[in-house]
Image: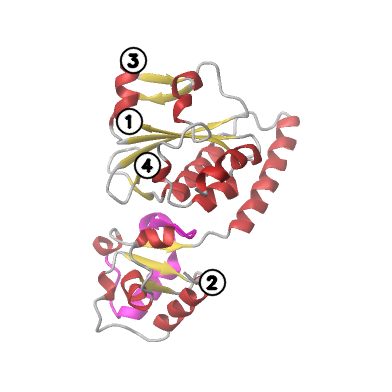
Amino acid sequence: MDIEKLSEEITLFSSTTHGSSDYDRDEYFVMSEDRNEFAPLKYLQKKFTELKDIYSLLKIGFVYDSFELSNNEAFQQWYEKQFAKKLLRRDARKISIVYVPNNKLILDQIGLVNKSYEILSQEQILLNGKNLPTQLGEWYAKCIFGLKQVKSTSQRGFDFIMEDGKRVEIQVEWSDLSSPKGVKIKKTLVDLSDYTIIIYVAKNFMIREVCFLDSEYVSRKFSNKGHTLFLKDTDVINYFFSKSSKHFDKIINPLTFLKYASPNLAMKLSEKLNQ
């Protein structure tokens, strides 16, 4: 699919109002490169036969978030102008914004952040900075597996959902080497999910490994470990993507995966992902 032509159609749609259409009820709105214009997925599907569903976009590098999490003021202004109606909260909750991340800018900033972390750590200023790595690891998972991030109905903050409605628990481990104790994860969170994904982020903020597990398997295998589980590498190594292709079918965007993988992991994955 030609992203440039897609962008042209978004601009064309935004050039006129659509108050008499039913496009305002669409669930997905695709954002232009300049992030000021949008078009409903249903409209774009009429223009591009290869655009069968949301996954057609996710596979070529798009990601999506619920509008509630996007903090996109431009969309609300655009929506109300296009459809001559207020964007009500009950309608906003159903909407997702689909967009292409600026990968070059992100990679450049990751390099700058990594350098800043090194300096601040050497100066004994930054002693615990896992908040950024955790959010970055979650973003990696969202891009790779085409997950939708939505506000949680519980007190967890937000959830990650697959297109088929399956809930995913994401655990991020930020280190160059795994802890001998294993990755710490709450059993209650595993029990609430269908899949558990561990994203191993290296100190330079690149992905050094990914482990994809069925949550039922985790609960069953580690049921005697109490409320807190410790998943050691030796226990789950057979589910590392560098070792096994078992869950490769869950990968929506292999190009993004390789782009943000460490060189070592990328070498191990490139041949498998291109088969």
Closer to us: mark 4 or mark 2? 2
Q: In x, y percent, where is residue 171?
A: 45, 33
Callout 3, which amino acid? Gly
Choose top left, top right, bottom left or bottom right for residue 54: bottom left
Closest to the observer: 213 or 75?
213
Q: Is residue 111 in the magenta section?
A: no
Choose top left, top right, bottom left or bottom right for residue 191: top left
Assess whether mark 3 and mark 1 are in contact (beta carbons under 8 angstroms): no
Closest to the observer: 34 or 241?
241
Residue drawn at x 32%, y 38% as measured from the top left: 155
Kindly report the distance in space between the C-alpha atoms of the residues bearing marks 4 and 1: 20 Å
Callout 1, which amino acid? Ser
Residue drawn at x 56%, y 38% as measured from the top left: 133
Residue 234, above or below 119: above
Callout 4, which amino acid? Gly
In the image, 185: left or right of 136? left
Span of residues in magenta: 59-88
Residue under pointer 2: 34
Please count the marks in the image: 4
Residue furthest to the bottom in view is 16
Residue under pointer 1: 215
Assess whether mark 2 and mark 3 are in contact (beta carbons under 8 angstroms): no
Kindly report the distance in space between the C-alpha atoms of the residues bearing marks 1 and 3: 15 Å
In the image, 260: left or right of 45? right
Identify the mark nearer the N-term, 1 or 2. 2
In the image, 194: left or right of 71? left
Assess whether mark 2 and mark 1 are in contact (beta carbons under 8 angstroms): no
Identify the mark nearer the N-term, 1 or 3. 1
Residue under pointer 4: 157
Residue under pointer 3: 226
